[in-house]
Image (spheres, rainbow, N blue to C red):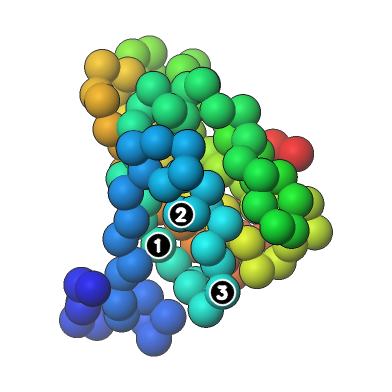
Amino acid sequence: MIAGAGMSAHAQQVNLMTAYNQQQLTRAVCMDAGTTSKIIIASMDLLKSTPYVKCPRGNAAICFSEDPKDPGHALVNIDPPKGSGKGLDCDAKADIGLSFVALNCLEASMEAKQHKKNY
């Protein structure tokens, strides 16, 4: 865990997970009980080839696309299962040439209301 000074109460400790294969990705995305924020270091190839992760509450959608405003960079979004306010919503932007990307995740109920979902 990483502690940060001057951060809000829910973000003082960071839950850091890695996802190099499908099993690790499923565990990182679906394990949402008690976690309001998380950073997932994931394989870029895994995210490109996985359209969704099957969780007990439903499927978490994964959207991988090139940023039209910044060619050569990928946008990655993981949306929680539809209707799951406790699921994690994850977002990242990275150079397309990278092997790994760091996804910033926040409990869906805590994110900005105008955030568009991919499901």
Furthest-right residue in this view: 83
Residue 28: mark: 2
Q: Residues within 10 Å of mark 3 (few under 14, many from 20)?
A: few
Image coordinates of residue 79 in percent, x first then y, are 63, 46
Q: Position of residue 88 (x, y in %)?
A: 56, 59
In the image, what residue occupies the spot 48% across and 22% down? 48
Q: Which residue is mark 3?
A: 33
Q: Secondary structure at mark 3?
A: loop
Contact, mark 2 vs mark 1 (Cβ under 8 Å): yes
Instruction: Looking at the picture, tell me which residue is in the foreground, 41 or 73.
Output: 41
In the image, which is nearer the foreground, mark 2 or mark 1? 2
Q: Secondary structure at mark 2?
A: helix
Label 3 to label 1, Cα distance in Å? 12 Å
Q: Could you give the CA–CA distance between mark 2 and mark 3, rounded to whole angstroms? A: 11 Å
Q: Would residue 28 be seen by someone viewing this image from the given angle?
A: yes
Occupied quadrant, residue 87: bottom right
Residue 38: assigned label: 1
Q: First in sequence: mark 2 or mark 3?
A: 2
Q: Which kind of residue does numbered mark 1 sit on?
A: Lys
Q: Nearer the viewer, residue 91 or 62?
A: 62
Q: Amino acid at mark 3?
A: Ala
Q: Identify which residue, 104 or 62, lies in the foreground.
A: 62
Between marks 2 and 1, how big is the CA–CA gap?
Answer: 9 Å
Q: Type of residue at label 2? A: Ala
35 left or right, relative to 14: right
Q: Earlier in the sequence, mark 3 or mark 1?
A: 3
Q: Are marks 3 and 1 in contact (CB under 8 Å)?
A: no
Residue 10 falls left or right of residue 115: left
Which quadrant: the N terminus?
bottom left
Residue occupying the far top of the picture: 71
